[in-house]
């Protein structure tokens, strides 16, 4: 029973940490979500699925 409670506590702390990070970051956006910041997409030359930016362009998502 102690292991289960400890596991729930650790998961709760992790979720709280992520929530605090989103609240503190400007506009609450995650870093590296656009193809300009994602090294996997840069190698393939793929465009961003959200804003349509190519790897050599700046992210076009202003929302």
Image (cartoon, grey):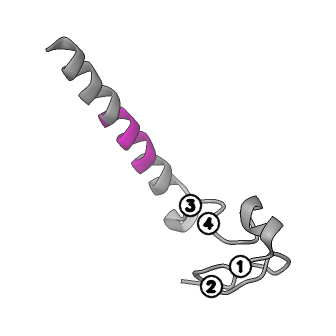
Please tell me how crowded label 4 is: few (under 14), some (14-19), or many (20+) other residues with Cα within 10 Å: few
Would you name the residue on which mark 4 appears? Answer: 33
Residue drawn at the location 23% of the way across and 15% of the way down: 3
Left or right, 5 with reference to 46: left
| Residue 1 circle label | none
Whether 27 is drawn above or below 4: the answer is below
Q: CA distance from mark 4 to mark 3?
A: 6 Å
Q: CA distance from mark 3 to mark 1?
A: 13 Å
Whether 57 is drawn above or below 2: the answer is below
Q: CA distance from mark 1 to mark 2?
A: 7 Å
* 4 and 3 marks in contact (CB < 8 Å): yes
Mark toward the start of the polypeptide (4 vs 2): 4
* 1 and 2 marks in contact (CB < 8 Å): yes
Would you name the residue on which mark 1 appears? Answer: 59
Would you name the residue on which mark 3 appears? Answer: 30
Task: Out of 7 and 17, give the one closest to the viewer.
Answer: 7
Q: Nearer the viewer, mark 3 or mark 2?
A: 2
Callout 3: SS: loop
| Residue 51 circle label | 2
- Residue 60 painted magenta: no
């Amino acid at each position: 029973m102690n292991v289960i409670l400890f596991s729930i506590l650790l998961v709760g702390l992790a979720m709280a940490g992520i929530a605090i990070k989103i609240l503190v970051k400007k506009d609450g956006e995650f870093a590296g979500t656009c193809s300009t910041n994602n090294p996997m997409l840069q190698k393939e030359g793929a465009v961003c699925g959200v804003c349509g930016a190519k790897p050599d362009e700046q992210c076009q998502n202003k929302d």
